Amino acid sequence: MEKLKNFFRCKRRKSEAAEKKDEKAPPPQEEGQEESQGDHVKENLVPIVQPPTVEGEVPSYFQVNALANMSLLNGYENGVWKLQTTTKTKSDLFLSSFGEGYPFLNNAYGGVEALQEMGPFHAALCWLTNQEFLLDLGANDEALSGQWFSVLKFGAATAEELQFTAKLRLGFERNPIKMELEVPIYRQPLLKGYLMVVPVEHFALGYRTVFDVNDKKFGMHAFCVGFNNQSTEISLKLENFEHLRGTIFQRLFGKWALALKTDIYGNVDQRNLHVGCQYEWGPGTLIKTKIRGDARLGFIVERKLSEAIRMVYNCSFDGKDPLNGEIRMGAAWYFNLM
């Protein structure tokens, strides 16, 4: 059920702010959509980095490079400020809200979500400040010695005119196989799915596809291979047989770690080259730094004050011209009161 409690998993940032005021930054990437390279399959979503798998769990297509993404992406996408809270009542009602200024202080955006669990069923209702309403109705249970889930996802946008959308998300996992399928129902043109297999311990193979129902053509065929023993992580993803990207994550001396994420072949962009380092400075404190291929430098200080409170401070500047270039600083606070 934890995979279904990703609050605000559908939230979107206003594309106008990113296009007009953040032209030097790379386009937003979300691990569920980062492989989309054609205009017909692009989605303007907030970067969402899926956490690494636990022992014995089959990784999803987007968790093959989870450790590298956690090191190189998580926290760096924050704006000037962010505040997120999550609480749980005695009746298993989850309430979550967030607000943020991205990419600048006055570009405020936020939302509120309620999620209710009823045995194997759950329902979630979300309102976003850009006048979007989201509704999830889902169920999960065990079958065929594995775990399955299904979620009906409805959306309504009222910014200009009332528009409804609907799609169905299905998934099944039985070691060593995991698969997910996203089926369009109404005003959702993309049929998506992936299949993951763990042939031997620590290794994973996967395939992902995107099919445009309206145009009746495939937007993507992607393959991945990954190795992860919790100390070393290596992944390769090949899209449409023309774009190859890779990641490496390596722990060193217990508290240190190095990470690399880059395009290897086809559509190579220097902004997609990330080299980073992280250090666990005492219990609950993580310090991260990275440099992008265009010499953009970033720093993160993450502090876990308790099981319920976490804060993240971020800073970035232009390494080519640190005095006159754009400097960004921000702070994010997370309260998980459950």
Image: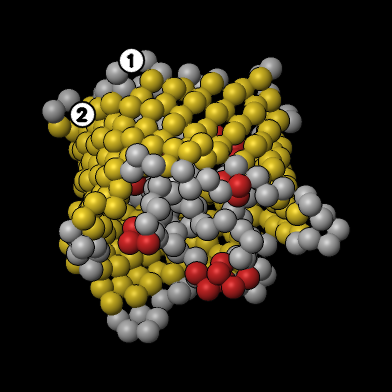
Q: Name the residue under label 1.
A: 200
Q: Mark 2 points at which residue?
A: 146
Q: Which is nearer the N-term, disc 1 or disc 2?
A: 2
* Amino acid type of the residue tagged 1 in the rendering: Val
Question: How busy is the neighbourhood of tag 1: few (under 14 within 10 Å), some, or many (20 plus)?
Answer: few
| Quarter of the figure with residue 95 | bottom left
Label 2 secondary element: strand
Residue 120 horizontal/vertical position (percent): 22, 44
Q: In this view, does 184 lie to the left or right of 26?
A: left
Residue placed furthest toward the left: 144
Colour scheme employed for the rendering of this structure? secondary structure
Residue displayed at 57% across by 56% down: 26
Residue displayed at 37% across by 84% down: 160
Residue 159 in view (yes/no)? yes
Residue 91 lies, with reference to residue 40, above or below; the image says: above
Residue 1 in view (yes/no)? no
Observer-nearest residue: 51 or 271? 271
Residue 28 horizontal/vertical position (percent): 51, 57
Q: Is residue 182 left or right of residue 56?
A: left
| Quarter of the figure with residue 231 | top right
Observer-nearest residue: 52 or 295? 295
